[in-house]
Amino acid sequence: MAKYVVVPSSETQHAAWLRGAVPDVERVRPGLWSIPVPLPVNPLRYVLVYALELPDGVAIVDAGWNTDEAYTALVAGLGVAGYEITDVRGVLVTHIHPDHYGLAGRIREVSGAWIALHPADARLVHDRYDDTAIDALVRKERALLVRSGVPAEALDELAGASMMIRHLVATAKPDRLVEDGDRIDLPGWDLRAIWTPGHSPGHLCFVSPSRRLLFSGDHVLAKITPIVAVHPQSQPNPLADYLDSLAAVGKLDVDEVLPAHEYRFADLAGRVEYVMAHHEERLGEIEVVVGAAADGVTCWEVATRLTWSRAWQTFPPFMRRAANNETLAHLAWLESRGRVARVAGEPDRWFAG
């Protein structure tokens, strides 16, 4: 696939990314600030929280992990913009992953801010983050990995691989549910919500037609593609959901994309086209692997035979699980088109369609 070079719209953010640094707090436009909040021991390094000025304070898009370091960075970033944490009136959460949702509850405790989520993600909060429910979710993940063909000796480690980041969330039920197409009630802003499922069932983007901006969360990023995976809380065919919502977002008439990671960029349509081509190439690679196995192949076996950004042997458990579940999402998409067939079992085996 031909290499596509995204057009950065912030040279300072882009330069910081290239040198492995965290960018400075930046005034994006009048009334709009970008605040990098650090992520602990994570290659993404930070999440970009956006502060939208209001007549009586600010609203923020996403929040960061629930760590003291992240909270301190957010407070300091708001200070650069001339605000205090108590001035936060609302937290628009793009999705419930810890680096976006984790601090929301702590912010609400301090400021009284409302928290907004899409209903599809709001429904997942209890089972994902409540201590009374997590064991059941891990059992479901383990069962999925069994059907994927994960070796027995790796099952328990992979099934519980995300437990290490659960403490980075201050569990908080949303005060507001935001549906696709909803206008967000923020004085001075004309934000509209766009439901973009795939990376999570309830992922939201927010578009400002007057400012020609898209707050894209993890849906569209400048360099990497978000994980789109089958897991116990996903839809059955999350890649179909993702590609459909990606195509819809690609038609938006905006000048700048404000993602949650990396750096701001222009040419939304070009980036969307490239990401869709990437997934089509991946689907083709998986189809070839399945077709070469006369006796069928498990999802895990397919994952180990694909081209990744680094050697499979170097993947830590969490990345191996993510790779397996992302491969499963591609297999589910191919199955829905009749390009591969599944014979159910423990494990499932996949054959050419």
Image: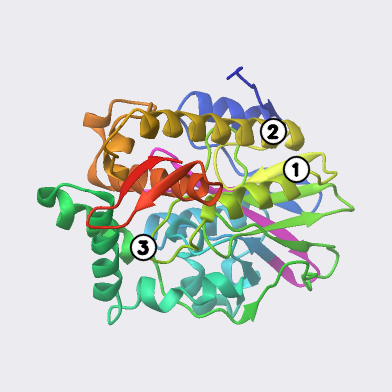
In the displayed structure image, the side of residue 344 where residue 327 appears, left or right:
right
Dominant secondary structure (helix, strand or loop) of the stretch shown in magenta: strand
Which residue matches tag 2? Answer: 273
The picture places residue 150, in percent across and down from the top left corner, at: 21, 48
**Image quarter hosting the N terminus:** top right
Q: Secondary structure at mark 3?
A: helix
Q: CB atoms at circles 3 and 1 under 8 Å apart?
A: no
Q: Which mark is residue 250?
A: 1
Callout 1 crowding tier (Cα within 10 Å): few <14, some 14–19, many ≥20: some
Which residue matches tag 3? Answer: 168
Q: Amino acid at mark 1?
A: Gly
Q: Secondary structure at mark 2?
A: helix
Q: Amino acid at mark 2?
A: Glu
Which residues, given as a range, are shown in magenta? 35-58
The picture places residue 187, in percent across and down from the top left corner, at: 83, 70
- Labels 1 and 2: the sequence-earlier one: 1
- Residue 328 versus residue 197: which sits nearer the camera? 328
Residue 52 colored in magenta in the image = yes
Callout 2 crowding tier (Cα within 10 Å): few <14, some 14–19, many ≥20: some
The residue lying at 72 percent from left, 32 percent from top is 9
Q: Residue furthest left?
A: 153
Q: Estimate the spatial distance between the alpha carbons at disc 3 and disc 2, rounded to whole Å.
A: 34 Å
